[in-house]
Image: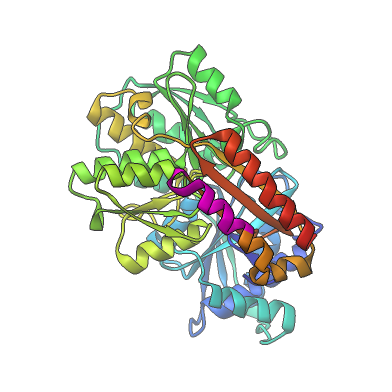
Amino acid sequence: MGRLFGTDGARGVANSELTPELAMNIGRAAACVLTQGTNRPRFLIGKDTRQSSDMLEAALAAGLCSVGADVLLLGVVPTPAVAYLVKHYGYDAGVMISASHNPCEFNGIKLFQSTGYKLPDEIENRMEAIILDSAEVPPVKVGGDVGKITYSETAVEDYVEHIKNAAQADCSGYKVAFDCANGSASATAEKLFNALGIDAVYTACQPNGTNINENCGSTHLEALQKTVVENGCRLGFAFDGDADRMLAVDENGDTVDGDKIIAICAQYMKEQGILKNNTAVVTVMSNMGFFKFCKENAIACEKTAVGDRYVLENMLANGHNIGGEQSGHVIFLDHASTGDGQLSAVMLLNVLAHSGKPLSELAAQMQVYPQVLVNVRVTAQGKAAYAEDAVIHEKIAEAEQSMGDAGRVLVRLSGTEPLIRVMLEGEDLDQITTIANEIAAVVKERLS
């Protein structure tokens, strides 16, 4: 990826790394690249609940207006709402201000094309060239050619109605807990799930600008697990800060991760005859138990690099309609152009209502194998030298041979940090822990 944009937009500490000046320049560059040939381009902007989101929204909108683009402000909405509404409203592009599951001091800028899909690398590279290298000079508009800003009064309702349409089963009366991460789902979850007749218990649904993801949401499931058990809920759902991912908790308080959610839904879709190409798409980080589940249930499986954008690229290229990540990004391509935590919750509720089984029973169909992840901090030179280091690759090959079919080894470069990630999976936790530490020691010796 490039210098500004990582695997999920531009991200950093707000007002330090991701400054208003940078946000303004991203707006100008986006208008230049995404709307060439459009006389009066139209952008919509959504945001999460971080204190800094208002500041970045103002800067982005100013940048867009300065080059002649009109802006519609959606207010606080989930990321997938931006992806849906940009196409539904017929706008040229959409922007979401959020740093997803990160703490409140971080923020980010994600961009969507008019189709509702995230930007491909080549478009982000062109934007970076404008911002960092002055490869193009954005036009300066004056007078009546300056863009104008309007405010949406229906964004939340329009998005909620869209997700309601995916509910195919009657779940009225189901007692379900929802952890909204004090983020974007705080603006939509209650309207959505109350309308579906759910007997809902909402937690982390009172954002104050700084409590987003704070001991709540999909990265901190402990509070939700307690809520589900203490309130006798059938299950619980935890969203992240911008509600594009979801992890579930069964009636016993046990975690049901993205791998299991994809497995449960893919199997249901196959039974219903709607699993396109009989295939699910996941990343190389999915648990080996997922791949065994697919094999046992005659479901084909394709693996991509880490990142939901790569899952989506594979799905679009090959015509598949379900895919995602262990972290809870799940893409139901028949309904959405990106991962959507609340849509995933509705789809999982459809399966529960149709099967009549508790979530624990559905999740138990996929065995989860122990995983060990060791992060090794390396120098920039070491990171660049990894691919050609014969000693490290010999050690990896030795580990793979010793484990055979009982496990797997995955060593990869971090896309965002000066790290090499050593991940092992297998039936014997002690064995994979020992081997992971041995590989990590060699990596550290060679590349740190």
**Residue 282, x across and y down, in percent:** 42, 53
In the rendered image, which quarter is residue 208 located in? top right
**Image quarter hosting the N terminus:** bottom right
Residue at 40%, 37% (x, y): give it: 345
Seen from the viewer's position, the closer of residues 412 and 320 is 412
**Residue 160, x across and y down, in percent:** 40, 43
* In the image, residue 444 lies in the stretch drawn in magenta: no
User: In the picture shown, does residue 302 fall above or below 235?
Assistant: below
Residue at 58%, 62% (x, y): give it: 7
User: In the picture shown, does residue 249 fall above or below 107?
Assistant: above
Seen from the viewer's position, the closer of residues 41 and 361 is 361
Q: Is residue 126 left or right of residue 80?
A: right
Q: Is residue 442 left or right of residue 432?
A: right
Seen from the viewer's position, the closer of residues 94 and 72 is 94
Seen from the viewer's position, the closer of residues 102 and 405 is 405
- The prevailing secondary structure element of the residues shown in magenta is helix
* In the image, residue 401 lies in the stretch drawn in magenta: yes
Q: Which residues are magenta?
A: 395-406
**Residue 293, x across and y down, in percent:** 34, 41
Q: Is residue 359 left or right of residue 52?
A: left
Q: Is residue 132 visible?
A: yes
Q: Is residue 373 visible?
A: no
Q: Is residue 342 left or right of residue 125?
A: left
Residue at 47%, 70% (x, y): give it: 92
